[in-house]
Image (tube, rainbow, N blue to C red):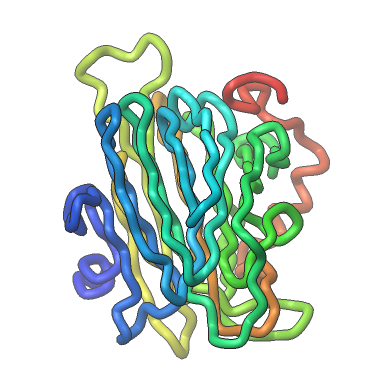
Amino acid sequence: MTTQSQGRWVRPAGSTAGDGWQTRIEPDGADWHHTGLLVADLAAGESRELDTDDREYLVVPLSGGCTVSVDALEWTLQGRADVFAGATDIVYAPPGSRVRMTADKPARIAVPFAVVPAGRAVPEPHRIDADDVPVEMRGTGVASREVRNFGTPATLQAASIIACEVLTPAGNWSSWPPHKHDEHLPGVESELEEIYYYELAAVDGAPQSAAAIGYQRVYGTDDRPFDVLAEIRTGDVVLIPHGWHGPSTAPPGYDLYYLNVMAGPGPERAWLITDDPAHGWVRSRWEHETVDPRLPFGGTR
């Protein structure tokens, strides 16, 4: 791997902390332009506030719940015990609004966002209930994973942001086969940069000394080289400006969660991908295998 790619695009937990956020990923005006992520651990009664300006935000409880106000509107998000317990309710906040989040008990809150180009139509603030989040079982066998599509175009009204949660049981491979979405090819591929935010958990029965880890691979094309092979832990972030990404692997003994945040400059809000032609053939095997019986996490919805 190249030290430059690894150091630039892999952000260990705590390395981006600032202004009351444990994770703060912002567009930098250089080679990261469209997406960002804020994550905060809040004590009971503690709040965070922000002005959305030219961005749209989602409020996504990772653990615990919170009360969310967007200007004069207010919702209570029940949240969940942790990311493996099931889907969560969320709130969407459009550009030009004021957002306040207050934890009713200790909570970890993720706030992904996307920059909205001038002139693009945006919806009103709204809430999506956990029971309305489509839960998809993607892949089969050791490529089985659960996808919670709370922020995809079919579920969420938004201008630019696309977001989802992916959960991979211990020993399985996710983001497989490797794929990319870094070119605007109408009807084939969309241009989207992407954030991966990770949480991991040792399986039941693991000793207290267990230190949950996973692995993430990202590699470039001939004309745009890129090289990341990272060991990941809870709170780590990998940024993907372009290139093939996958696999995300959950070693035996450790379940893997990641929050994906995507947006790009294209006129269409769509997730269209191209498989790496060296590995895309593995999809043909899925029809002959069954989905991992450990899915979905948190029980049947």
Q: Residue at x 78, y 52 (%)?
A: 284
Residue drawn where x is 39% and y is 49% of the image: 100
Furthest residue in direction top, as rendered: 205
Q: Please give the name of the residue rendered at 56% of the width and 65% of the height, measured from the top-left corner.
A: 161
* Residue 168 located left or right of residue 269: left
Task: In the rendered view, tell whether residue 137 sits above or below residue 295.
Answer: below
Residue 268, position as x, y percentages in the image:
70, 78
Quadrant where the image shows the N terminus: bottom left
**One can see residue 136 in this view:** no
Q: Most extreme residue toward the bottom, as rendered?
A: 223
Q: Nearer the viewer, residue 249 or 43?
A: 43
User: Residue 101, position in %: x, y?
Assistant: 39, 44
Badge count: 0
Residue 84 position, x and y percent, is 50, 28
Work out which residue is located at the far front of the displayed protein and give it: 72
In the visual, does 262 lie left or right of 43? right
Residue occupying image coordinates x 37% and y 78%: 32
245 or 15, which lies in front?
15
User: What is the x, y in percent for residue 79?
Assistant: 50, 31
* Residue 188 image-quadrant placement: bottom right
Q: Quadrant of the C terminus?
A: top right
In the displayed structure, does residue 90 sit left or right of residue 270?
Answer: left
